[in-house]
Amino acid sequence: MEPVLFGNKRALHIRESNKNRINVIISKLREFISVNMWEKEDIKWNYESFQKMKETPYLLRPVPVKRNKIGNIVNCPNYFFLLTTIEDKKICCFIEKKRPLESANIYQVRFRFKDELFNDTLLTGTLVKTTETSLPIREEVTEVFSSIFTSIKREITASIHENNSIFLCNDLWVYKGKDVSNMLSQRLVKVQDILGREWYPDLRLDVCGFDLIPYNNYNDIEDFLRNDRKYFTYEMSDHKIISLSTHNVPGTEEYRFSLKYQVPKPSLNESMVYKDGKWSVNNIISNDSINKKEKEKEKELILKTSDFPDVYIIYNPINNKKLGVARVRTMNESKTLRKLFENTNNIKILCKWIPEFEKWQPVIKH
C-alpha cells in the first residue's frame, strides 16, 4: 500500500502488489445483492426509459463537476464508501464506482464511526472540492451543542482550509450487513441519521467531510439548476441529471441524461425536448414532406402501424415520403383504427391537416 494525497489528507492506495487485500475487498462488495445487480445492469437513457420515468415516481439529483488540470469541466469521481472488518480490524475504504470492480482504485482511510457500522455498511456518493473557507473551532459552541444533544456525543470541528473535500452521499446500499430494500426517501433519511448520529468528525483523521447531495422532483429540477445551485459550495453541471426511482432496489433504475439534448423516439419522426420544467414532443417534419397547398385541404394518405400501440405513421402515397405521426383524438377513434388494422399494417384513408398541432388527422366516420 502506498500513501497518496486523497481529499484533505493522505490515504493508502491499495496497489496490485497487495492483490490479496484487493480481492478481499472486492469479494466483500460482491456479497451484497445491490452491488451484483449494479455490475450486471447496463442502463441507458432513451425514449423507453423516459416513458418508464413518467409511470414511476423518480427523484433527480445534479451532477457535481470540477475543472481538471488543463481547465476542462469534468464530472467529479464517484465512489463506494465501505465500512467493514477485515482480519478483526475496522477498515474504511473508498472504491471507485467502476465496472468491472477489478479496474477500480481502492483507497484505505481512517474515520471515527460507531462500531456497529463496521459490520458492513456501504454508501455511494461523489467526492467534491468546496469553495468555502470554514470557521475555526469555537469552544463555546461545542459546549452548547453538547449540552443540547447529549445522546449524539460529538464534537464540533471545522477546518480553516479552503477547497476542503466533501463526500456527497447519494444513497445507502447496505446497512450493518444487510442489503437495504427501503424506498429511496427512507434510505436518504437513514444516511442523514448516520452522518448526524453515527459519525464523529475528527480533524486529525478525516480525509474529507460528509454531506447529503440535494434531490429534487421532476418539476423543480430545472429551477434548481437555474437559480439554486449557486448557493452551494461546490460546482454542479447546469444540465446533467441523474434520476433514481423512488421505489427502486439500490443499484438499479438509475439514469443519466442531459437537459440540453433531445431524446429521439425510435422509428418515429419526433424527439423529446426538456423545456419549461417538462419533456415535450418536438415534431420534425421535412420541408419536402408537406407543402403549403397540402396543409389547406383534406387528402387521401397512407396510414401505417408502428412499434408502439395507437401510434400510426402518415405517408404520402405518391412518393412514399413520411409525413409524421397521425393525430388520434379519442378512444373511439383509437378503437376504430385498431379494427381497420386487424388484418393489415397499412391502409389508405382520408386525412385532414390540423395546423395548431401540425399533424395529419385521419377522418374517422362513425
Image (tube, rainbow, N blue to C red):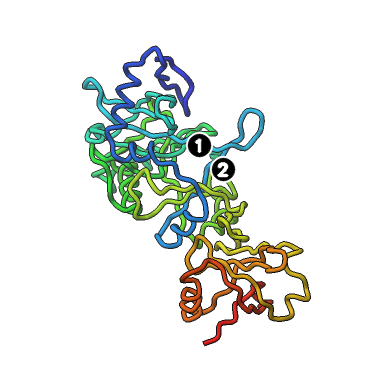
Q: Quadrant of residue 27?
A: top left
Seen as rendered, the residue at the extreme bottom is 366
Residue closer to the observer: 314 or 168: 314
Of helix, strand and loop, which one carries label 1?
Answer: strand
Which residue does the image show at 42% across and 36% down from the upper left? 209
Q: Which residue is mark 2?
A: 235
The amino acid sitting under disc 2 is Glu
Q: Which residue is mark 1?
A: 128
Residue displayed at 33% across by 48% down: 249
Relative to 51, is 34 above or below?
above
Position of residue 290 relative to residue 200, above or below, is below
The secondary structure type at the circle numbered 2 is: loop
Q: Mark 2 or mark 1, which has the lower sequence index?
A: 1
Q: In this orientation, which residue lies closer to the viewer: 185 or 29?
A: 29
* Residue 32 % position (x, y): 28, 36
Residue at far front of view: 343
Dot 1 alpha-carbon crowd within 10 angstroms: few under 14, some 14 to 19, many 20 or more? many
Snapshot quadrant of residue 137: top left
How far across and down, in percent of the image, does residue 111 sit?
A: 34, 29
Q: Nearer the viewer, residue 366 or 331?
A: 366
Most extreme residue toward the top is: 17
238 with respect to 172 (left or right): right
Tell me if mark 2 has few (under 14), some (14-19) or many (20+) residues whose alpha carbon lies within 10 angstroms of its own: many
The number of numbered badges drawn on the structure is: 2
